[in-house]
Amino acid sequence: MIDEPAQTLSDLAQRLATRLLPDLQTTYSQADAALISGLMLGLAQDYERAVDNRMRDINEINEIFRSLGNEVPGAVERSAFMDQAPSSLHLTDVNTLHAQGMELLIQLHAWAESADDTLNRQIWQLLHRHCERNRFDITGG
Amino acid sequence: MSDRLQQVGNAIAAYMGELWQTTCSLQHIEQIPGGASRETYLVQLQQEGDPVGIVLRRDPPSSLIDTERALEYRTYAAVYNHGVVPVPEPITLAETNLGELERPFSVMALVPDGQASPANLEMPDMEPVLATLGQRKWHLLGQLASTPISDLGVEDFMARPEHPAAAALAYWEEVIEADAQHPQPIAAAALRWLHANLPAPPEQLCLVHGDYRTGNFLYTAAGDITAVLDWEMAHIGDPLEDLAWSLDPLWSNQPDLAGRLLPRAEAMQIWEASSGLKIDREAFRWWQIFASLKGLAIWISSAEDYLHGTTKEPILAMAGWPMIDRQNRILLDRLSPLSTHEHAPPLA
């Protein structure tokens, strides 16, 4: 098991930027190394949070779905989604369920825009939280 | 100089010697970083004893934007011949008989003065000329907007859309549909809004640069713009498209400044004065949302290209991951009824 993988990725990115990059001989190589360092910082951030972020989205989508009655279009599909859990906590499996939930959310949002202002606002709130928790800060690279 | 650079340099020197029917040798070559759509090289040649600078733009195996090189080259030629905005002189386009360069390429004359770096605008010596540079930037864009497309001759090789907004929206919607790796709820909301609020076609069409932003022109320390670059997304369209794109919050790290240069209201005034066109505020709101959606489409396409393309250029991933994140937050700020305008000011 690798201890602190996110921190390790971040440390490697910093070393690339501060120790190796200055010794590269062309502007192109230096720019490439700076980009790679920045991307490693992004990977470090996402490594730590990716599964948690997807699961939070899935839970919040479920919360919205649970609050809806059968009169809202898509009830059967929502019910089927709510009965599911990811088949494992591997990111690939979590992503599969997350994508299903997001597709249903998009359809619901399209309906809510003209039919249910409260629901529309709830979905926008979810999207604000979704964006905030997936925010990257890779300026350190 | 690496073997790879030396090989490219020797190959272009040989090619240009043959083209010019003269003796041509390589003096120096360097690759420019950040060229996401083409490999770009600055090349110094010796032509019968005289120094000649050229810029070589070669197709990569994988590109950020799937563009047609011939269209870009012919656009450069049209704009250069007309002179409405400064561009490098196009020298040749090679799509066959490529010799050792292997992939299609174009060659332009090197513009001796100017740099493109947006970050360097924040150097202390640039601060006194930022307003002058901003004036020049939106003045040139206004000039381009008011130049009849028939004067430029671009109708020979560009489609003339009946409804520019509808055509542009259809194009970028297709890119998102084709390249998105997972559902995009904010893009979907933007697309619904854009379809529901389509503006009428403009009274006058113009040549749209397609990527007119800080970073795509060469500027000097005196605040002049010596060349407008990167015309690969040029098309005939609505004059408001470039203006909205140039003002997208993505291109500035200061929310109150457009393109790191001027307050956006001032940029709009300069554009109106230069073009003689009056900004239709309702249509402009549409083009601003569209600009952010188009940006998102490009970053989605870039992420897809990084994932499935062959080059694995880091710039594709950089354009893909953090840019999708930032452009999503900008669109959210523009569309959500709960917006706090942290990432994008209210629509102009």
Image (cartoon, rainbow, N blue to C red):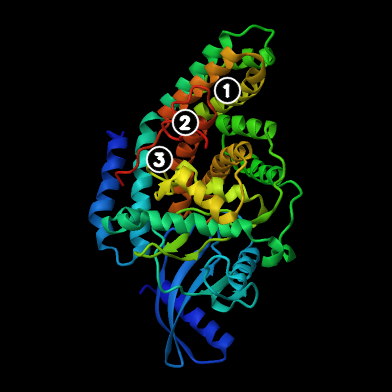
| Picture coordinates of residue B163, whole percent (x, y) | 74, 46
Q: In this figure, which residue is indicated by the disc labeled 3?
A: B256
Image quadrant where residue B28 sits: bottom left
Gap in angstroms between the C-alphas marked 3 and 2: 39 Å
Residue at mark 3: chain = B
Secondary structure found at label 2: helix
Mark number displayed over residue A91? 2
The answer to whether dots 1 and 3 both sit on one chain is no
> Residue furthest toward the left?
A19
- Specify whether residue B208 is in view: no
Say if mark 3 contacts mark 2, CB within 8 Å.
Answer: no
The residue closer to the viewer here, B4 or B246, is B246
Residue type beneath disc 3: Asp
| Picture coordinates of residue B53, whole percent (x, y) | 45, 79
Does B342 sit left or right of A108 as displayed?
left
Secondary structure found at label 1: helix
Q: For the image shown, how many numbered marks are present on the structure? A: 3
